[in-house]
Amino acid sequence: MRVLVVGGGGREHALCWALKRDHPHATLFAAPGNPGTAQLGTNLAIAATAVADLVTAARQHSIDFAVIGPEAPLAAGLADALRAAGTAVLGPSAAAARLEASKAFAKEVMARAGVPTAASRSFTALDPALAYIRSHAEPLVVKASGLAAGKGAVLCDTRAAAAASARAMLAEGSLGEAGREIVIEQFLAGEELSVLALTDGERVAILPPAQDHKRLGEGDTGPNTGGMGAYCPVSLATPALLERVRREVLEPTLREMAVRRTPYAGVLYAGLMISADGTPSGNPGYSPRAGSRGQRAVPGHRAGRVAAQPGGACRRARGGHDGPRRARLSGRARTGRRHRPAGEPRLRRAGVPRRHGPRLGRHPPDGRRPSARRHYARPRRALSRAPQRRRLRAHHL
């Protein structure tokens, strides 16, 4: 087998190493490659984005299979051109590669697919972007929508810093074409998880997850880089969590891409932020990536029932915390006399007298008459022992 690996970074060196390990007799080519790939095969002095030259080289060297590593040649249509020339390729089409090449497009796809994500807005003009920043809570994230070699995401602690980043990208062109459109996004706190999966557009095979370290300085400080290192396996990535990633992130995304008639085949990457503060934000009533990721579930709570307690305090049966209001019962109800709010059906048929005393059982311990019990909901046992689910949100595809 004759294999062409497109790219010249550490990722391509690792790909060549793994291919040579599993197929010792394979003939490897790398374009443009690096000193590491040169020890495993033959480097071709062709840029990864030179689509026409790479198609010609694949024909000249009788390449059977091509593996495309970087995002830029995928966005330039290299996979489409190689397939048209009869070469098998691992990599999505240019239309599908927009998931990586355009963060604004990825946000749109996740919104339509119902993938949980942070609230965001996309801008191509500076003034609307600055107006949005002024009304946005701190901190926030400013991202170049296009490919910026891992340097397009700026974490901003203040609105002033966010405004400066937006001005640099949109007005000053600091990131070139990559920053002609920006995404301003809600800041997500949690633990990062990178999940990659092999897919043919329908089926998904999740690869071992990794955890990335992108900040330049010690203690996760400084600007983002293209990647300061990663490790695998990750203890955070339990089988249950990975199943949720499959069900809530990967499969909905693939279905949405198929609906758009741009099926995604290749390696699909999901950059996730995991926090332990409740159910996924994509649930109805919270904040799916589509519209507003801003609202959050109350940590440690589900939509608990509200039960009236003796004394009139309104408590959530979930954990017994005082609610924002107090349930006010009339004096007649507190004294145990008959009380029926307007609109409520009668609790007994007309003409049938109320029964008190031994027939209704023992009096409640607080001394109220038995007939008053119908005005109070029994406190439900607290559910605080119920296991909490981690919140999972995809911040990038």
Image (spheres, grey):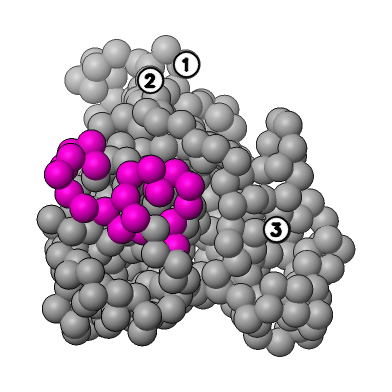
* Mark closest to the chain's N terminus, 1 or 3: 3
Q: Nearer the viewer, residue 31 or 91?
A: 31
Report the side of 198 relative to 229 (left or right).
left
Q: How many C-alpha atoms fall within 10 Å of the one at disc 2: few (<14), some, or many (≥20)? A: few
Q: CA distance from mark 3 to mark 2?
A: 39 Å
- Badge 1: residue crowd in 10 Å (few <14, some 14–19, many ≥20): few
Q: Which residue corresponds to mark 2?
A: 385
- Image quarter of residue 75: bottom left
Q: Which residues are magenta?
A: 20-42
Residue 301 in sight: no
- Mark 1 or mark 2: whose residue is earlier in sequence: 1
Whether residue 299 is situated above or below residue 78 in the rendered picture: above
Residue at image mark 1 = 366
Q: Which of pointers 3 and 2 indicates the residue nearer the eye?
A: 3
Q: Residue at point 24% right, 17% down? A: 361
SS label for mark 3: strand
Q: Earlier in the sequence, mark 3 or mark 2?
A: 3
Mark pair 1, 3: CA separation: 60 Å
Q: Name the residue type under label 1.
A: Asp
Q: Is residue 343 depicted above or below 17 in this figure?
A: below
At mark 2, the secondary structure is: loop
Residue that numbered label 3 is attached to? 154
Q: Mark 1 against mark 3, which lies toward the viewer?
A: 3
What amino acid is found at the position of numbered circle 2 in the picture? Answer: Arg
- From the viewer's side, name the closer residue of 139 and 340: 139
Q: Quadrant of residue 218?
A: top right
Magenta highlight on residue 29: yes
Q: Are marks 3 and 2 in contact (CB under 8 Å)?
A: no
The residue lying at 30 percent from left, 37 percent from top is 208
- x and y, in percent, of residue 82 in the image: 24, 77
